[in-house]
Image: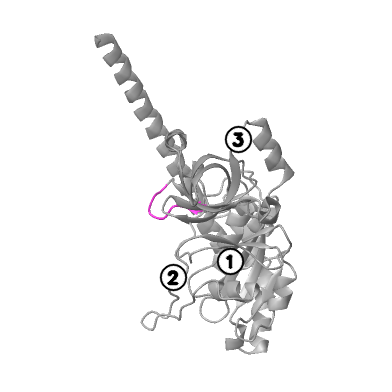
Amino acid sequence: MKLEELGYTEKLEKFRIENGLKSLETGRVVAEHKERYIVKTASGEFEAEITGNLRFSAQSREDFPAVGDWVAITVYDADFGVIHQVLPRFSVIKRQAVGHFGDVQIIAANIDFAFLVQAVDRDFNVNRLERYLTICYASGVTPIIILTKTDLISEQRVAEIVEAVKLRISDVLVIAVSNETHKGIEALKSVIEKGKTYCLLGSSGVGKSTLLNSLSGETLMTTSTLSESTGKGRHTTSHRELIVLENGGILVDNPGMREVGIADSSGGLETTFDKILSFGEHCKYNNCTHISEAGCSVIEAVQNGEIEKAAYENYLKMEREKAHFETSVAEKRKKEKIFGKIIKDYHKKDFRQK
């Protein structure tokens, strides 16, 4: 397989040459299993691990390879290699690491488009869609909303849900599909471009793995039924994996995410809720929080029905979450700086005693 078929670009090749990496092979991370990686190169597919130097120099988990990354690798035998460097990313989809405030988890790297997958039966939730939109916009990734399991409800109800999504979320393509009847699958295939990378994002049980099988025309991923006790989807995909489709599109499947914590520092919220922010420009005070201030144009728009109340409440919730995350990051950096100073002073003292 040629690297171009995996999305390799002239810009990446220029970086490789200018940074003295010509003696190493170039490959793309197609799967990750607890810091063991599967890397696909022009000569084959290899299991790989990172060098000790790369591990030591990493400032955070974000510096480690992720599915979708391009890496410089040395291949040592028929099926094993060592990753020396991660090449520059043009996009990174990430969220708050579950249970670790101030830490970030990379979902996938070098993604062009994200399929935001929701089932129209029990999973449908516009608030969650806005969360996914926010992490996409913060990452510079173009979102496409995919509504699945349309065979489980009437066509009229499907049309109502699509209209409800479009009313709340503007300028985002919405495609309704059924993996059972294959209705809408051809429309979805038509938006997939050769050489572009797409990422599947959604909760468990919404039909991501079945959708992947429908797009590829073969059973690449096992699927699972809903849990009888909870009515919720089981995790079928247990790791991230990159797959090249028959039409040349590149697709990253992801485990279902129960939590989508916002780790936004690049204007994702502002883009998702641009309607709210446009009203905010006319507020009486420049630093208006849009919560209780007199003369707040956003509150007035909510009261007048120009802004949907549910969207407004979701915006406030995610804004608080973003502020909490940013505070956690600042506190973490402060602690790391203090700890670094302690270590530095210790080494100075130890040197003097010697």
217, above or below 6, in the image: below
Q: Check disc 3 and report the residue beneath it.
A: 23
Location of residue 59 in the rendering, given as x and y in whole percent from the top left corner: 46, 36
- The CA span between labels 3 and 1 is 44 Å
- Which residue is painted at 55% across and 67% down in the image? 127
Q: Amino acid at mark 2?
A: His
Q: Nearer the viewer, residue 237 or 266?
A: 237
Location of residue 304 in the rendering, given as x and y in whole percent from the top left corner: 66, 67
Lower sequence index among marks 3 and 2: 3
Lower sequence index among marks 2 and 1: 1
- The CA span between labels 3 and 2 is 41 Å
Q: Check disc 2 and report the residue beneath it.
A: 235
- Which residue is painted at 70% across and 58% down in the image? 196
Q: Which residues are magenta?
A: 95-101
Spot the residue most to the bottom: 154
Mark 2–mark 1 contact, CB under 8 Å? Answer: no
Q: Amino acid at mark 1?
A: Leu
